[in-house]
Amino acid sequence: MLLPVAGMLKAQSNLPADKNADPKTIALYHNLQKLRQKGIMFGHQDDLAYGVGWQYENGRSDVKDVTGDYPAVYGWELGRIEIDQPQNLDGVPFDLMKKFIREGYERGGVITISWHLNNPLTGKSAWDPAPGTVASVLPGAAKNELYKSWLDKVADFMLSLKDKNGDPIPVIFRPFHELNGSWFWWGKNHCPADELMQLYRFTETYLRDVKNVHNLLYAFNTDRFSSEAEYLERYPGDEYVDVIGFDIYQRGTDNAKFIDETGKSLTTLEKIATGKNKIPALTEFGYSGLPDPTWWTNVLLKAVQPHHISYMLAWRNAGKKTDGSEEFYIPYKGQASAGDFILFYKSKRTLFESDIAKEKLYR
Ligand code: BMA
């Protein structure tokens, strides 16, 4: 069919960053935009793998233990896939992760994947900020071939994600997260903005055009930020990005400060998203240990409910870690904030699995 020029331009601009994305990935892209009008999807990292005090129990989830429902969004993490480990940096076996991804997707949920990849220059962890690492992986530099071999493994993983019809499972890929902080090797103090942008573009182009991975939407995300200019300082360009987000954690008991800062940042994020036709999301959040029994309705809900963002992803319920510390961001049964989490679950503004399954996000 011949489209008038204006219509053609509109149709083109309404595609994700990957113009050859698979049909279900394109459907997800459109439906994420639409669903923002209905509510904010709730997500949880590693939800189906483990929770506080349990690991790998079929069908179990801390979100479900407390609310009776699964989250709408499932976060997973690829760190250490690049060095051929059978498990990621948090101990989740990649073959089980694939099974969990299929389960969440078949229920109608949304999958997002982060990657705390090792430092390719030193071989140490993502938290090793050796100077020159980003420059070393760019085309023509010493570690580019190694980095490409790492991307080959990410591509294999993404391409192996198939639904029961054999169609690729769409994933929101979130590489180089918190890039305005300086704790990772790709962080702000360890490379000029231009190098980070090149790294982001190279990564995406390689996965898409060399490896033919077409089931990804791309998320760009910072840590907490204070202005639109700061947010966009390292943004690789509209043609590379589908979802824009930031990560924010409450530290300490100042609830008003968290509500204020999160709210202001969401307002800025939504403004950028509207101008650029992107999907805004709270890509990670949490208040570790949840010491405040009404944090969900009295703090988080107050911060997010005026905003039309796509989703909010709570970080992982690691429970007791090997170093003796405890880490969790959503309540388990009996935890002090469990009752309030149920009220948060019941809010009209929050969407869980039972709310979104009927939305058929992949059609
Ligand atoms: C951090 C913590 C770590 C974990 C890392 C990557 O925020 O949860 O325990 O290894 O994320 O998932």
Image (cartoon, rainbow, N blue to C red):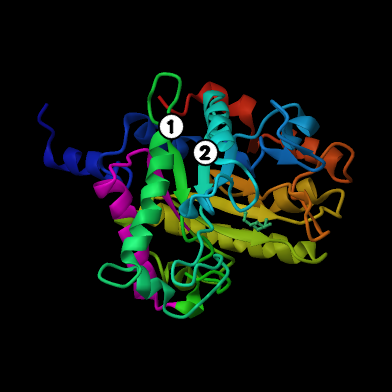
Question: Which corner quadrant of the figure contains ligand 1?
Answer: bottom right
Q: Is the residue under label 2 in contact with that under label 1 (CB below 8 Å)?
A: yes
Within 10 Å of disc 1 (Cα), the crowding (few <14, some 14-19, many 20+) is many
Residue 271 picture location, percent across and down: 46, 58
- In the image, residue 74 lies in the stretch drawn in magenta: no
- In the image, residue 201 lies in the stretch drawn in magenta: yes
Residue 39, located in which quarter of the rendered image?
Answer: top right
Looking at the picture, tell me which residue is in the foreground, 193 or 42.
Answer: 193
On screen, residue 67 above or below 234: above
Which structural element holds mark 1?
A: loop
Give the CA distance from mark 1 to mark 2. 8 Å
Q: Which quadrant is the C terminus positioned in?
A: top left
> What label does residue 169 carry, if any?
1
Residue 236 shows in this picture: no
Residue type of the residue flagged with mark 2 = Ile
Image position of 165 (left or right of 44): left
Q: Main secondary structure of the magenta part?
A: helix
Q: Residue at x 43, y 41 (%)?
A: 157
- Magenta-highlighted residues: 191-220
Residue 225 picture location, percent across and down: 56, 69
Mark 1 Cβ and ligand 1 under 8 Å apart: no
Within 10 Å of disc 2 (Cα), the crowding (few <14, some 14-19, many 20+) is many
Residue type of the residue flagged with mark 1 = Ile
Which structural element holds mark 2?
A: strand
> What label does residue 111 carry, if any?
2
Residue 135, located in which quarter of the rendered image?
Answer: bottom left
> What label does residue 12 carry, if any?
none
Image position of 320 (left or right of 144): right
| Furthest residue in direction top, as rendered | 165
Residue 3 picture location, percent across and down: 13, 33
On screen, residue 157 above or below 325: above
